[in-house]
Image (cartoon, rainbow, N blue to C red):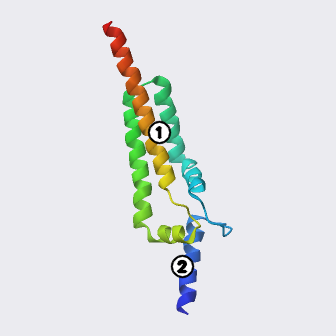
Amino acid sequence: MHFARIDAVYHEACDVFNPGWNGETVSEWHEALALASHPVSLSLLIISAFAIWRRSLWIALATSLLWAIWTGHIFVADIVNDARRTATDLGCVGHSTLFIRLAIALCAGMTLYTAYIRLRRSHLRRH
């Protein structure tokens, strides 16, 4: 009886976080793609592209702050939400660490690129 209840909780966690799960373990790449296709991530990607296109350090910094809030939300949800941890342990949800690392790399690259452009422009104005 006790094991049937545990199995029901496990399957409920997978039904909530990955409906239609086929039983295969979800990799970090699949989870990163799923998180990247979320509307918030897509919006932040568009704003990041705009910051790079405009070569604006301030937009890049503001976008990096928004990325930090979004990835922080994902990180905290992974830790605090027991059902999500259960789903991750079962393999129906992948770990979000790859997505968070890619977001950090994007923010670092975007900020360094726009800072370099800004520094180069100020250097050219002086000479």
**Amino acid type at mark 2:** Val
Mark 1 or 2 closer to N-term? 2
Please tell me whether residue 111 is drawn above or below residue 15 in the rendered image.
above
Q: Residue 21: image x %, image y %?
A: 65, 67
Residue carrying label 1: 106
Please tell me whether residue 42 is drawn above or below residue 97 in the rendered image.
above
Q: Is residue 126 left or right of residue 83?
A: left
- Residue drawn where x is 47% and y is 23% of the image: 54
**Amino acid type at mark 1:** Leu
- Residue drawn where x is 53% and y is 69% of the image: 87
Q: Name the quarter where the C terminus is drawn.
A: top left
Q: Name the quarter where the N terminus is drawn.
A: bottom right
Q: Residue 8: image x %, image y %?
A: 57, 81
Q: Residue 32: image x %, image y %?
A: 55, 52
Residue carrying label 2: 9
Q: Residue 49: image x %, image y %?
A: 51, 32
